[in-house]
Amino acid sequence: MIAIYARVSTEDQLKGYGINNQIDECLKKIKNQEHMLFKDEGISGEIIDRPGLTLLRENVQAGIIDEVVCYDPDRLSRKLMHQLMIDDEFRKKGVRVVFVNGEYAQSPEGQLFFSMRGAISEFEKEKIKQRTKGGKLRKAREGKVLGNYGLYGYDYDREKKSYKINEEQAKVVKMIFDYFTEPTSPFKGINGIARHLTDMGIPTAKNGKVWHRQVVRQMLMNISYTGKHPHNRYDTEGDYVRKQSGQTTQQKIRPEDEWIYVDIPQIISEDQYNMAQDLLKESRRRYAKDSLHDYLLSGLLRCKDCNNTMTGARASWWGEKVFIYTDVKNYSGAKNKGCGNQIHTSKLDDVVWEHVHHLLNNPDEISTFKQSKKVTAMFENELKQLEKELEKNKKGRQRLISLVAQSDDLDLSDIQEQLEEMKSKEKSLQKKYTQLEKDLKAAKGESNEDMITSAIRYYTENKDSLNFEDKKAIIRQMVKQIYVSKDHEEVDIHLF
């Protein structure tokens, strides 16, 4: 039995190449003899696990097929290794492979030509991918948005290759950021905002009726709303092939220095975006589910001795029911059971509020307030050490380059390998250095002055009528973390 195999990829279909022409040419080749047809439509030639091809191979193994007719070797596969494997598999079963676009004799010369055609086909495929990617990056560097990604708050301008503000959606974006960053917001965290948007009947980007917390979170994390739209952010190499073969795709984020930013209209300020990022890091604990008793410092406390989080609980002390903060974790699977640090809520609440209250009335002291001398000293020492390592690595690279310039008999491949290793090391060190700088800045309480300014403004306007919820909101706006020693002699308050 003769088998005809035909294939077109999604790219071929978009370019207008159909599968029927291949089939017609194959039918002419066999002069319309009886045959079985196997085909794959919209599947990349880079993968070997295709339904039509798999069925063909199964029929060959079963001894049903005597001859396979295909328009061109690259229809079997775009990869040379796959072409050779399939050809060898068929020949071992005594099945002859015939191509309409060129005859390949079963001889060393014919096999060489077959291999060359496969190599050229694979090379052409890679060159197309490279040119497409290069063209997109060039357009991004020219300030053009590469396509309509459905960015909520914007409409895509096809002529200008850019985004323009959608006024109605932009109001929602501002609303989300305002609700999340304002200390007096009536909605607790991302989930509260999502429920509020749903209750208001505001349609989602796809005209849905329900806002999910993850959608709100992604919007809060999207730097594009500051007017800087990133391209080349994700490494999608191989994603198309994995998707075609039924595998899950895993988007890897490229190093930030490889991103290309395109200017688009701004919806929110960079300061408010940074404020939202700081709050997002803390939001999981800060906006935990409501408990039977409201705790002023819930989500902010850690034990200074064992570093466990401290949560509110009801306890019995000397026969009296009291509320405490404790680091003890009794639940199954707790990694750290805690060191037994416990303190009355009223005692710690008074200490923290008294300190915050003093700073609110003396804002000039905030700039000189040092939350943790040990932490800042540690970061500063690490930064100095990294500076030395970076300088040492830089000098090492310079010495290698000078050595190459002065010598004629060196093995350049070894030198090149060493240079690549040193370059990779420098990149890693620089990434650590940048992160440490951010950590040091945060430890000194300089990371987000706007949050503290907002809290001071609210306190000034309402200081004569503050209730429990007001105090709680102000503390959350100013305080990032509170460390309490087990002996209660030290209470370290870290501001934002």
Image: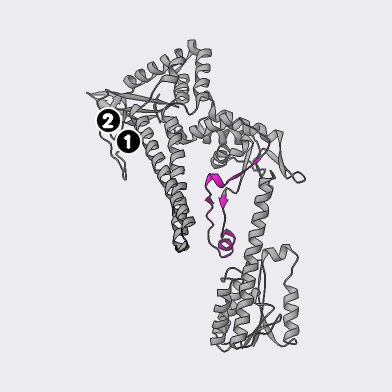
Quarter the C terminus occupies: top left
Q: Residue 458's spot in the image, x, y percent?
A: 52, 17
Dot label at residue 386: none
Q: Which of 471 and 388 lies nearest the eye of the viewer?
A: 388
Residue drawn at x 56%, y 58% is 237
| As drawn, 246 above or below 450 | below
| As drawn, 463 above or below 312 | above
Mark 2 neighbour density, 10 Å: few (under 14) some (14–19) many (20 or more): many
Provide the secondary structure element on which disc 1 rests: loop
Q: Are marks 2 and 1 in contact (CB under 8 Å)?
A: yes
Q: Is residue 171 left or right of residue 461?
A: right
Sequence-earlier tag: 2 or 1 = 1
Q: Which of 279 and 253 lies nearest the eye of the viewer?
A: 253
Residue drawn at x 57%, y 84% is 90
Q: Which of 185 and 491 lies nearest the eye of the viewer?
A: 491
Q: Residue 194's spot in the image, x, y percent?
A: 56, 36
Using the numbered discs, state the Cα–Cα distance from disc 2 to disc 1 in whole angstroms. 9 Å
Q: Is residue 460 left or right of residue 40?
A: left
Residue 64 in view (yes/no)? no
Please name the amino acid that badge 1 sits on. Answer: Asn
Q: In terms of image quadrants, where is residue 121?
A: bottom right
Label 2 sits on residue: 341
Q: Which of 487 and 98 lies nearest the eye of the viewer?
A: 98
Dot label at residue 308: 1
Quarter the N terminus occupies: bottom right
Please name the amino acid that badge 2 sits on. Answer: Asn
Q: Residue 77's spot in the image, x, y percent?
A: 61, 73
Q: Residue 111's spot in the image, x, y percent?
A: 60, 83
Q: In terms of image quadrants, where is residue 127?
A: bottom right
Q: Which residues are magenta?
A: 234-262
Q: In terms of image quadrants, where is residue 303?
A: top left
